[in-house]
Amino acid sequence: MKVPLNWLKEFVEIDCSPTELAEWLTMAGLEVEEITRPFSYLEKVQVVRITAIKPHPNADRLKICQVSDGNKDYEIVCGAPNVQEGVLVPLALPGCTLPSGLIVKEAKIRGIKSAGMLCSQKELGLGEDHSGIWLLPSDFQVGTKLIHALYLNDTVLGISITPNRGDCLSMIGVAREVA
């Protein structure tokens, strides 16, 4: 059973680390098999605004997008058909490993340096849309890490429930055990 700690905290106060909680639950008979942060790769994805777009001099379908995180400007080569000035989009920075296994790096694309990658929902593992870059809601804060903007900064406990602990097959049951 997967137990997101943010959800568990809606039912019970937790004042220890996930590791300590896992040890306590295991000693109480609920074996914690894993502790994960499933969206930790989003730490290297920022909400940015596209400030300018110009055509790529060496490619018909590519565009050079100037984007800003509020503190720094980046130049990104993008081939998405839906890029437009003024919209908020996710920018994967160099070093980000996407769910597909792709590691984002600075790269020269047809002679122009690209300082990251503007991403679709599918590339980020957050949906099935891959028709273009993900146009984020306009109320997101520029410069925010996407993991915080989407409230995905959570730790998940993987708990093995034994047959004699049917009382813990729900969040309420696990919360009772924690309380």
Image (cartoon, rainbow, N blue to C red):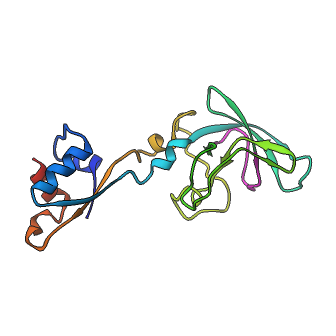
Check if residue 101 falls in the magenta segment. Answer: no
Q: Nearer the viewer, residue 151 or 112?
A: 112
**Name of the residue lying farthest toward the top:** 71
- Residue 161, picture quadrant: bottom left
Q: For the magenta stretch, what is the residue range? A: 77-88
Residue 17: x and y, percent?
Answer: 25, 40
Residue 4 left/right relative to 139: left
Looking at the image, is 1 positioned above or below residue 145? below
Q: Nearer the viewer, residue 104 or 119?
A: 104
Which residue lies at the image location 16% right of the left edge and 56% below the top edge? Answer: 26
Q: Quadrant where the N terminus lies?
A: bottom left
The residue that appears at 65% across and 37% down in the rendered structure is 49
In the rendered view, tell whether residue 29 sits above or below residue 154: below
Q: Position of residue 160 (x, y in %)?
A: 21, 66
Percent x, y for residue 120? 62, 55
So how many labels did they put on this image? 0
Residue 134 lies left or right of residue 61; in this view the side is left
Instruction: Name the residue rendered at 29%, 46% in the picture.
Output: 6
Going by the image, does 105 lie left or right of 20?
A: right
Pick whichever, 157 or 68, lies toward us.
157
Find out whether residue 81 is within the magenta segment. yes
Residue 51 place in picture, x, y as percent = 72, 35
Q: Is residue 164 above or below residue 17?
A: below
